[in-house]
Image (cartoon, grey):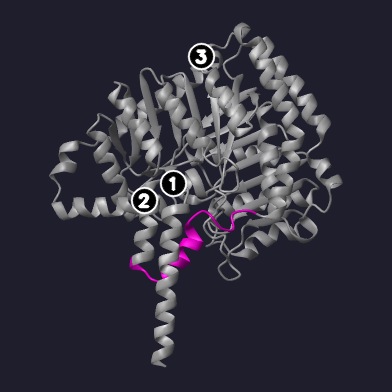
């Protein structure tokens, strides 16, 4: 028996050394993330190796169906993107939208790196509370004529969740095509029977990377997108999931209200949202719900429709139709399966480095990677007004501890932080009151690398000013955080912050 344990001990030590060497020489992540994993594997023999497989970001991140569908869409859209990029270069000097021309380098970067075309909103509504968003969403769901496609990270079986599910079931019975994709981890506390109600009513519900049958190695890669497309003409996206916590006075902690940002859009940009949903849905569909052939895929991703959409967008670019709500946008996607998985983060960094005056950020988590941290530091050193709103009441204590160390270091360079009363869940970035991005991406490594995320970039000064006003209103409600307070904390507390920061790359 003793010999057996010795053999196992030697084998474990060997594997431990192999993984540390692998991380040191072959891990393609930054030095901070390498160091975090080496510490975990060294201090947690065996368990650390298992966690590396589960959480590192290198393993089991995609499915064959996802690869096949994405290749199909890319093959369809590549000529479309090439044509639009050439057209944009040709007419750029004649475009009246100053924001679109001023930030043309960002537009072209998103063309090349994110395969993201320009599209347009024909109307846009912005909601800063769950009550507002749910009221509008319910009205649109009730009015749906042909299709309802929804994907959410969290879909709860509570007051608002039951109300929306009842509408989906009723619409499915009436013949409307209803498809729901929910993240299995984000909706872990919601019973499967709750979603099966939609299947029995004639709709279709699918979990993203299911984890309830044991614990597969895809547990770390979650679909964090919030994406609704109704009748292929109306789209909803932003930070709000389906749950009572987004409604003032409801949820588990009604005294700590949630503040979020969500959008309702129409126009050609909805087509990009639709394609995003269909890729995600059919990547996870199984059995009768799965796409069985390329012919069936063509029904959802028709080439002729993409061509006609390109002509419509080119007309909008050329005419530059005036109007407060007609805004050029680019939809950006990121995820661990992408060839270039940092599209959203890289666009945010490019926005920060392009700022001449101000950078306004709202985020529920703040553990940036090295490149994002450096961008904020350099922009602050260059005299830009960098302001970041974070929660007063954090939902993860260890993330708060790590964030405090990042915040303390950046405050030394002049970055200003504010604590919003309650829990701010909005994910927004506005520069110079000219350019804005809103979406699902938090300022942390998990969102930058491990989650499937989506953001929209809005090239419109009027819309950016509106978001700057919302930001300033939130600042008035918030408490400014002082560097003196951080520096005056007991040394053991500051040591804890620094210790948690070491592990921020895997939080």
First reached walking from the N terminus: tag 2 or tag 3? 3
The magenta stretch is 43-62
Residue at position x 40%, y 52% in the image: 34
Query: Percent from the top left, x then y, of residue 361?
Result: 39, 32
Query: Percent from the top left, x then y, of residue 324?
Result: 57, 16
Name the foreground residue: 114 vs 385.
114
Q: Secondary structure at mark 2?
A: helix
Q: Which mark is residue 58?
A: none
Report how far apart the C-alphas of labels 1 and 2 lie in the structure: 8 Å
Q: Secondary structure at mark 1?
A: helix
Q: Given contact means CB atoms under 8 Å apart, are the residues at marks 1 and 2 in contact? A: yes
Task: Locate residue 348 relative to residue 214 in the image: left or right.
Answer: left
**Mark 2, other Cα within 10 Å: few <14 / some 14–19 / many ≥20:** many
Query: Mark 3 highlights which residue?
Result: 102
Query: Percent from the top left, x then y, of residue 84?
Result: 70, 21
Report how far apart the C-alphas of labels 3 and 1 lie in the structure: 29 Å
């Amino acid at each position: 028996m003793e010999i057996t344990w010795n053999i196992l001990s030697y084998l474990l030590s060997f594997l431990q050394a192999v993984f540390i060497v692998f991380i040191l020489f072959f891990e393609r992540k930054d030095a901070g993330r390498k160091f975090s994993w080496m510490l975990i594997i060294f201090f947690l023999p065996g368990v650390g190796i298992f966690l590396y497989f589960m959480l590192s970001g290198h393993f089991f991140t995609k499915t064959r169906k996802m690869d096949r569908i994405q290749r199909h869409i890319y093959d369809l859209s590549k000529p479309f993107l090439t044509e639009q990029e050439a057209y944009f270069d040709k007419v750029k000097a004649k475009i009246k939208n100053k924001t679109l021309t001023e930030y043309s380098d960002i537009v072209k970067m998103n063309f090349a790196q994110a395969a993201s075309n320009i599209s347009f909103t024909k109307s846009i509504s912005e909601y800063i509370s769950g009550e507002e968003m749910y009221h509008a969403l319910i009205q649109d769901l009730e009015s749906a004529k042909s299709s309802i496609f929804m994907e959410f990270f969290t879909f709860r079986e509570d007051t608002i969740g039951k109300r929306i599910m009842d509408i989906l079931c009723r619409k499915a019975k009436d013949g409307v095509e209803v498809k729901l994709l929910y993240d299995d981890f984000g909706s872990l506390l919601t019973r499967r029977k709750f979603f099966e109600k939609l299947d029995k009513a004639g709709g279709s519900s699918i979990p993203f990377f299911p984890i309830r049958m044991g614990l597969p190695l895809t547990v770390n890669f979650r679909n964090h997108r919030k994406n609704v497309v109704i009748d292929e003409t109306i789209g909803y996206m932003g930070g709000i999931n389906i749950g009572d916590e987004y409604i003032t006075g409801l949820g588990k902690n009604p005294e700590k209200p949630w503040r979020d940002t969500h959008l309702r859009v129409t126009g050609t940009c909805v087509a990009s949202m639709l394609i995003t949903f269909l890729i995600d849905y059919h990547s996870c569909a199984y059995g009768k719900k799965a796409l069985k052939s390329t012919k069936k895929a063509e029904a959802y991703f028709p080439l002729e429709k993409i061509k006609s959409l390109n002509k419509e967008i080119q007309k909008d670019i050329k005419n530059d139709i005036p109007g407060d709500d007609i805004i050029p946008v680019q939809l950006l996607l990121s995820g661990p399966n992408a060839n270039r998985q940092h599209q959203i983060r890289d666009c945010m960094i490019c926005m920060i480095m392009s700022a001449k005056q101000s950078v306004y950020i709202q985020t529920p988590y703040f553990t940036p990677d090295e490149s994002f941290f450096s961008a904020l530091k350099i922009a602050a050193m260059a005299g830009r007004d960098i302001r970041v709103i974070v929660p007063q009441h954090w939902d993860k204590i260890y993330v708060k501890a790590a964030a405090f160390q990042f915040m303390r270091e950046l405050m030394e360079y002049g970055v200003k932080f504010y604590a919003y009363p309650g829990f701010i869940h909005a994910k927004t970035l506005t520069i110079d009151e000219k350019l804005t991005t809103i979406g699902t991406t938090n300022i942390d490594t998990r969102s930058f690398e491990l989650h499937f995320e989506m953001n929209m970039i809005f090239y419109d000064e009027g819309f950016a000013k509106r978001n700057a006003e919302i930001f300033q209103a939130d600042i008035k409600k918030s408490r400014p955080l002082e560097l003196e307070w951080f520096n005056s904390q007991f040394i053991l507390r500051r040591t804890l912050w620094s210790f948690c920061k070491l592990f921020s790359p895997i939080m």
